[in-house]
Image (cartoon, grey):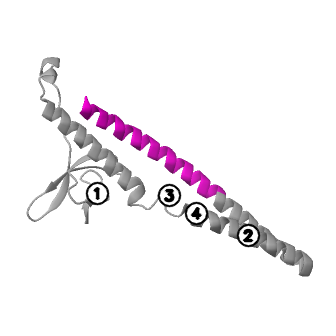
Amino acid sequence: MKKQVSCNNCGNLLELHQGTKFVACNNCQAQLEVVKTDNSLFTKNRKSSKRQSSIAENRRSSEDSFAEIYEAIDMLDQKWNNQFVVKGASPDRNVKFDTFMGIFVIIFGIACTIMAALMAPMLVFLGIIFIIGGTWGMLNLSDRRSKYLKAKKKYEEERAALKNKLNH
């Protein structure tokens, strides 16, 4: 179940999955903690902890280190979900259908152009418009997909690096 909460920094409305403890605002990039009380749900800016010395840093328990890594993984997952899943920006959903429709529109445009050339030469531009539209749609799909795959690869690499820290 998803819930909505406002960013404490800029007021942007954020969608949260149940159990989310930390979130990054997709508008102002603020790092926020999700606070749930009996009657309300709100965010507050995360305070950056200042390490007073290298000795204190070396004495941190492994539990704290694991908690920070899990927190970083949660923040990374939340950013990914806000960027692609919640907004529906994932071009992975209907690649075959979108490709089929692009090819169909191009073929329809070619057929219209040929028929118009034979029957009504003034309507040749109508077929050309379909050809241009289908070609543009195919190129746009390819561009969106390559950007999505690049972002997905980066997300997976960052997540794997964080998971590796847990194993070491």
Identify the mark at residue 11; answer none if there is no mark.
Answer: 1
Residue type (three-letter) at the residue carrying disc 1: Gly
166 within the magenta span? yes
Q: Please tell me which of labels 1 and 3 falls first in the chain.
A: 1
Q: Is residue 48 visible?
A: no
Which of the two discs, 2 and 1, sits closer to the camera? 2
Q: Which residue is mark 3?
A: 92
Q: Does residue 110 appear anywhere in the picture?
A: yes
Between disc 2 and disc 1, whose residue precedes? Answer: 1
Within 10 Å of disc 1 (Cα), the crowding (few <14, some 14-19, many 20+) is: few
Q: Nearer the viewer, mark 2 or mark 3?
A: 3
For the residues carrying marks 4 and 2, which lies nearer the camera in this image?
Answer: 4
Using a 10 Å C-alpha cutoff, classify the residue at mark 3 as few (fewer than 14 neighbours), some (14 to 19) or many (20 or more). Answer: few
Mark 4 and mark 1 in contact? Answer it, CB < 8 Å. no
**SS for dot 4:** helix
**Residue at the image point whose x is 35% and y is 38% from the top:** 160
Three-letter residue code for mark 2 = Phe
- Residue matched to label 4: 96
Q: CA distance from mark 2 to mark 3?
A: 25 Å
Q: Gap in Å between the C-alphas at discs 1 and 3?
A: 31 Å
The number of discs equals 4
Q: Nearer the viewer, residue 91 or 121?
A: 91
The residue segment tinted magenta is 139-168
Sequence-wise, which precedes: disc 4 or disc 2?
4
Residue 130: quarter of image:
bottom right
Residue 56: give x, y in percent of width and height.
Answer: 12, 22
Name the residue carrying label 2.
Answer: 130
* Residue 1 image label: none
